[in-house]
Image: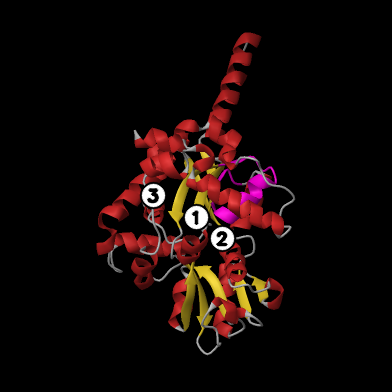
């Protein structure tokens, strides 16, 4: 083979290799009970994009962020508190989709017999949640509202599986958590306050979002748009008929499988969330600059994290880490 042909063959091989690498992505997900789980089960993203999808489940947003920082994960599900902390530290991430508006889907639940009927009763009690999560943020906001010094509460850092085990053993008096653990805690506990109620009282919203490595997303824009379309379609399917989903239905079974929930708990759990449409995300949640719901929520969360010395600085404009363009393209 002459040098020209050899060089051409090598170039072709390199090009093919790069293309193959570009057609594969690792996505980190958690256990939130959301419509998108049925799209995961149906391999809708694989069908829409032609990419090889490596799904990797994590026990908390902090773990997702660490995996993204190492380059092991390119796209991931993270709560607004985790996103605020990561981008404040300078992680090269962009928020591009609101997986859910948490609302009443996260709640502070007290064990029956614990003596906890209101937030102020947490003084001297043991409460668990994942640190640097949306529920950690709202726990602190709730304590501040109730004029309780956090130092007077035994606040324990546990991932959801650990919260479940501690609750079952009777090691904790309360937890501020989400489903599927929330549904289990409610069975022998009582809801004290929800994230939706805290947001209504303070204006400090929380949400779960999808973030991507900025450079990877820019290089795979077509994938990103198709990914958002798949998620938007799943949410639309739930908004259109989700209230009629039954525990033995295919949609509920898929969501239960991917979230680790019990099928009988899914309909009630998913009803606690709100799922903004692509248009709402492009115009109100992600779009709108500093006035966007997401940008304001990240700014408020980061200010709190700074006061708690969880981060060293805040950004002057959190809309700089929000990309509404994919949602805008889908909303056309």
Asked whether the viewer can see residue 18, the reply is yes
Q: Residues within 10 Å of mark 2 (few under 14, many from 20)?
A: many
Helix or strand or loop: what does disc 3 sit on?
A: loop
Q: Residue at x 63, y 82 (%)?
A: 125
Nearer to me, 171 or 272 = 272
Q: Residues within 10 Å of mark 3 (few under 14, many from 20)?
A: many
Farthest residue toward the bottom?
113
Instruction: Tell me whether the residue at label 1 lies in contact with that at label 3, contact meaning CB atoms closer than 8 angstroms.
Output: no
Q: Earlier in the sequence, mark 3 or mark 2?
A: 2
Question: Which label is found at residue 276?
Answer: 3
Q: Earlier in the sequence, mark 1 or mark 3?
A: 1
Q: Is residue 252 left or right of residue 120?
A: left
Cα–Cα gap, marks 1 and 3: 11 Å
- Write down the residue under mark 1: 207
Cα–Cα gap, marks 3 and 2: 18 Å
Instruction: Tell me whether the residue at label 2 lies in contact with that at label 1, contact meaning CB atoms closer than 8 angstroms.
Output: yes
- Write down the residue under mark 2: 134
Helix or strand or loop: what does disc 1 sit on?
A: strand
Q: Position of residue 59 (x, y in %)?
A: 58, 62
Q: Position of residue 202 (x, y in %)?
A: 52, 60
Q: Residue at x 59, y 60 (%)?
A: 133
The quarter holding residue 218 reads top right
Cα–Cα gap, marks 2 and 1: 7 Å
Q: Residue at x 30, y 61 (%)?
A: 250
Up-down: is 227 above or below 255?
A: above
State how many labels appear: 3
Q: Which residues are magenta?
A: 73-94
């Amino acid at each position: 083979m002459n040098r020209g042909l050899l060089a051409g063959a090598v170039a072709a091989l390199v090009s093919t290799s790069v293309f193959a690498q570009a057609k594969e992505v690792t996505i980190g997900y958690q256990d939130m009970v959301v419509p998108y789980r049925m799209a995961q089960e149906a391999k809708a993203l694989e069908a829409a994009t032609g990419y090889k999808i490596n799904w990797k489940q994590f026990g908390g947003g902090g773990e997702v962020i660490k995996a993204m920082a190492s380059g092991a994960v390119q796209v991931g599900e993270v709560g607004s508190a985790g996103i605020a902390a990561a981008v404040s530290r300078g992680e090269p991430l962009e928020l591009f989709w609101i997986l859910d508006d948490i609302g009443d889907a996260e709640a502070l639940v007290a064990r029956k017999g614990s003596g906890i009927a209101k937030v102020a009763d947490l003084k001297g009690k043991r409460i668990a949640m994942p640190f640097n999560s949306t529920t950690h943020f709202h726990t602190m906001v709730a304590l501040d509202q109730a004029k309780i010094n956090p130092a007077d509460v035994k606040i324990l850092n546990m991932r959801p599986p650990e919260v479940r085990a501690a609750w079952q053993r009777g090691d904790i008096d309360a937890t501020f958590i989400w489903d599927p653990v929330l549904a289990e805690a409610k069975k022998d506990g009582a809801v004290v306050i929800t994230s939706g109620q805290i947001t209504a009282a303070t204006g400090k919203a929380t949400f779960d979002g999808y973030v991507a490595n900025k450079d990877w997303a820019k290089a795979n824009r077509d994938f990103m748009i198709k990914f958002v379309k798949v998620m938007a379609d799943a949410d639309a399917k739930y908004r259109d008929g989700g209230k009629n989903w039954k525990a033995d239905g295919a949609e509920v079974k898929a969501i239960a499988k991917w979230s680790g929930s019990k099928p009988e708990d899914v309909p009630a759990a998913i009803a606690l969330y709100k799922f903004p449409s692509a248009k709402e995300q492009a115009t109100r949640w992600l779009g709108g600059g500093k006035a966007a719901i997401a940008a304001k929520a990240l700014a408020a969360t980061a200010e709190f994290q700074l006061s708690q010395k969880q981060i060293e600085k805040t950004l002057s404009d959190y809309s700089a880490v929000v990309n509404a363009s994919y949602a805008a393209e889908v909303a056309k």
